[in-house]
Amino acid sequence: MRRLILDRLYGLAGGIAATAIFAICLLVTAQVSLNILARLGGPAWSYTIPSYADFAGYLLATASFLAMAYTLRAGTHIRVNLVIQRLSPNRRWALELVTLAIGAALAAYATWYGAGLVGESWHYGDKSTGIVAIPLWIPQVAMVAGLALLAVAFVDTLIESFQAKAPILSDVGAE
């Protein structure tokens, strides 16, 4: 059941993150092409995508936060392997449990306060200051969703590590 639901959810979030990166590439390529067109054609051919930098920033935040749970479960987060590879399996497991618990607590804390930020943005009707005024709660929701999914992934991995009674992070991506 866990595999069916959570692993698909992690994969979906990773897919959305990849799509957001691809959208950034398309957006920036389009704007660069318009800049080249303006250079070659003169001022009459000068066009711009309104608030393209804002949109690229929102897409980058979406990609960054939604990719975190996927990369944790895939075992591709940056770890200090030089230190942990020198530890015995029991000490490595203990360190893994502690770091997973701390990570879960920090991700839950960030999710809680991020959700409060989304609520405030919604309540006050906060909008971006660019040419295209975007309600700020829209990009903030992706951030909070990514943080919440990261908290779930930390707890999920912590439970798996407890059940295995051994460190699993180096093996998570090999499945």
Image (cartoon, rainbow, N blue to C red):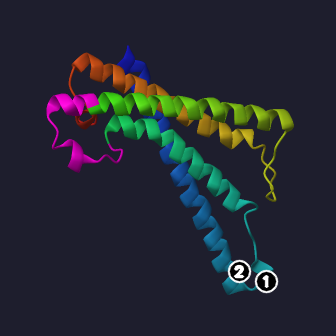
Given residues 39 and 162, the one toward you in this image is: 162
Given residues 73 and 20, the one toward you in this image is: 73
Given residues 132 and 107, the one toward you in this image is: 107
- In the image, what residue occupies the spot 71% across and 80% down? 38
- In the image, what residue occupies the spot 76% across and 78% down? 45
Would you name the residue on which mark 2 appears? 38
Q: Quadrant of the N terminus?
A: top left
- In the image, what residue occupies the spot 67% across and 54% down? 55
| C-beta proximity under 8 Å, tags 2 and 1 | yes
Residue 48 within the segment the image draws in magenta: no
Q: Which residues are magenta?
A: 76-94
Which mark identifies residue 43? 1
Q: Quadrant of the C terminus?
A: top left
From this view, report whether residue 42 is shown above or below residue 154. below
Left or right of residue 5, residue 29 in this image: right
Kindly identify the amino acid type of the residue bearing the numbered disc 1: Pro
Kindly identify the amino acid type of the residue bearing the numbered disc 2: Ala
Q: Quadrant of residue 43?
A: bottom right
Q: Position of residue 50 (x, y in %)?
A: 76, 61
Left or right of residue 160, residue 82 in this image: left
Q: Quadrant of residue 120?
A: top right
Which mark identifies residue 163? none
Distance between the Cα atoms at labels 2 and 1? 6 Å
Looking at the rendered structure, the secondary structure element under dot 2 is: helix
